[in-house]
Amino acid sequence: MDTDIITFLRLNYSLSSSTGNIEEERYINKYNIEVYEVQIDENDKESSSLIGKVDVKLFLWELCIEDNYWVDDLFSQLDHNELGGLLFDYETNSFKKEWQEEIDESSNSNILYLDRIEILPEYRGKGYGRLITKDILLRLNSSYGIAILKAFPLQLEASHPNPSKQKNEWNTKMNFKQMRQDSNIAKKQLYNFYKEMGFKRYKRSEYFYLNPAFQNPKLDRDIPKIIKFKATTSLRISCLFCIFKHSPQKTV
């Protein structure tokens, strides 16, 4: 019977870094996360499906300071000029005043950038996006002083001119064209999604941020209880979240 099926998410974190002459690569950790929906039936038989992919970047600003590395070089080389200009005063090689005040509260000047969160169409509307975002924020909590993202609907992005075969297959499954194409409505929905998790909008920009130094009751609202966790000692980590047993819980 379907009522005897346990469903949960498994997040596999892969950390990549580079060595060599590409100096700016020393100051960023890149996390590629694969999200699986796992089901266990009444006979303890497990099945899993890849339902989402996430890209996260951790900018190691504290290491930049130690090495006297200039922030404009870092963000320009990594093709994040807009983000760098938002956060930093390039002339003084330091955070802008409003961001420095936030950083002072958390005692950590590293920046967690949630680059992309992609969930396949048939798994949307189940509250999985909220669960995934919460896990990332908590899993890396001690590593950053500000979490920031650009809330821009993926379906409105310009197509990449030469996607790889694997990326093209994934984009086909994502079915971006079937998602809401009205820019104003799509952005409003996305803005509300992050506001409901406690993110603050930076002025009237597309950027939203969260300071981990402050309690955030909104992040826990309607989140199913975590009943199982598993982590390996390697750079690959699995995080298990029970979503429901018997009857699904409705989540935002």
Image: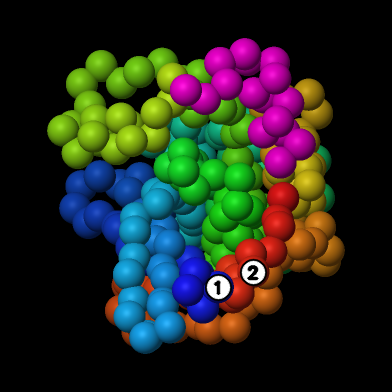
Q: Is residue 188 magenta?
A: yes
Of 92 and 173, the residue lying toward us: 173
Q: Which residue does the image show at 41% across and 58% down from the upper left?
A: 35
Q: Give SS at disc 2.
A: loop
Q: Give SS at disc 1.
A: helix
> Given contact means CB atoms under 8 Å apart, are the residues at marks 1 and 2 in contact?
yes
Can you give x and y, in whole percent of width and height, for residue 232 in the image?
Answer: 36, 83
Callout 2, which amino acid? Answer: Ser
Q: Which residue does the image show at 33% across and 35% down from the upper left?
A: 173
- In the displayed structure, 124 sits above or below 132; it is above
Place residue 124 in its image quadrant.
top right
Tell me how the rendering is colored. rainbow
Residue 194 visible in the shown view: yes
Mark before the other along the chain sequence, 1 or 2: 1
Which residues are drawn in magenta? 178-193
Of 245 and 88, the residue lying toward us: 245
Callout 1, which amino acid? Answer: Thr
- In the displayed structure, 176 sits above or below 96; it is above
